[in-house]
Amino acid sequence: MADEQTILRYVSGALDAGVPYDAVVGMLRARGWRDREIYKALGVRYSDVTGMQVPLRASPAAGAKDAFLYLLAFSTLATWTIASGSLAFRLIERWFHDPLFSEPYQQYQTYEITWSLAAILIAYPLYMLITRTILREAAVDPDKLDSSIRKWLTYMALVIAASIFMGDLITALAFLLRGELTSRFVAKSIVVLLLSGGVFYYYFGGLRKTEPSEISANRDRLMAVISAVAVTIIAILGFMQLGTPRVQREIRADSQRVTQLYYLTGQIRNYWNVHGSQLPSSLGDVPGAHQFDPVTHAQYEYIPGIGSQYQLCAVFTAAKQNQEPYNNSGVWDHSAGHACFSLDAKGFTPYPPQ
């Protein structure tokens, strides 16, 4: 109320002194007054002069639709930014390899990359579509930019972004203090700063925007282009690490073959123990064995040897060398094409790396 009385006294005094209308508006703008406040004061002044109230347009209150759009926008924002950060972290861990801090299972990293890519490919286009809808509605009805729902939900999104920012930095710093490579820490910190900084720059600056303008429109377009380029680059890098879905299917088929052969070793060992230290003459003698390739349905090759020694063979799509830090026996290393594994019915066979 004090601000309203201040601007009203100035407007009345300036117009009574013969100051041109445009000059009054320009000087108030230069002092930081918003157009809505200026024209509201002018309306009160002209109402006093003419004796007629300036009619008020009924402004629709922010309702369920606005809340829905903003909640959906911020949820998709959180989804694709978290997924982008997670994908960038996994790529950094592969590029800056640290044998002391490798994941126990390589397959876990692959799964995390696929989930991150899927989240980005779904959430980011939805976020851009929803944000475009919000900006279009704000251009038609500028009052939406000053709605309490928009401000509350924006501040909530900023709190979440700040929490993620601190959590990621704390995690990265904790690994650095445990002895992780400094280059990995620096790279991860840059990723966190870019993602969180971009979110803060766009939304915290947007809280001050109460009226559409060419400057804000250019800012929206600039951030859209920057985010689209960043997401495209990170997605391409992710696909370069994974390969096509066909390649992933072939990798999964090879992994399934090795797993089935591992279970075969257990059944052959049971046969050896039950039949008085004697190997089966063929896989047909081993009941319930996984004997067939999951893709070609060809029977695995079994070659009995001397004593408890034997071999199991299969045809693989690609070569694989064991890189698991907790299982470095190399028993299940194989080349592309036909490959055989030398095994012992009396010995312990390590579980194949995933």
Image (tube, rainbow, N blue to C red):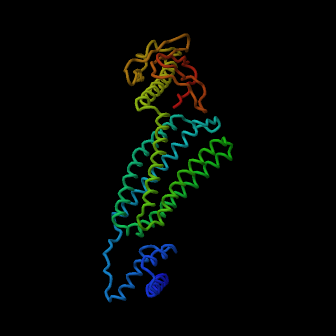
- Residue ID at (61%, 48%): 172
- Residue 319 screen position, x and y as percent: 51, 22
Residue in the image at 46% along x and 78% along y: 24
Residue at 43% x, 19% y is: 286
Nearer-the-camera pick, 228 or 292: 228
Q: Quadrant of residue 139?
A: bottom left
Residue 346 relative to residue 133: left or right? right
Rendered location of residue 219, percent (x, y): 46, 57
Q: Quadrant of residue 144?
A: bottom left
Nearest the eye: 260 or 71: 71
272 sits to left or right of 71: right
Q: Is residue 202 above or below residue 328?
A: below
Residue 148 image point, x, y percent: 42, 70
Q: Nearer the viewer, residue 31 or 334?
A: 31
* Residue 275 pos. (x, y %): 49, 17
Answer with left or right where residue 112 lies relative to residue 188.
left
> 314 above or below 144?
above
157 w.r.t. 16: above or below: above
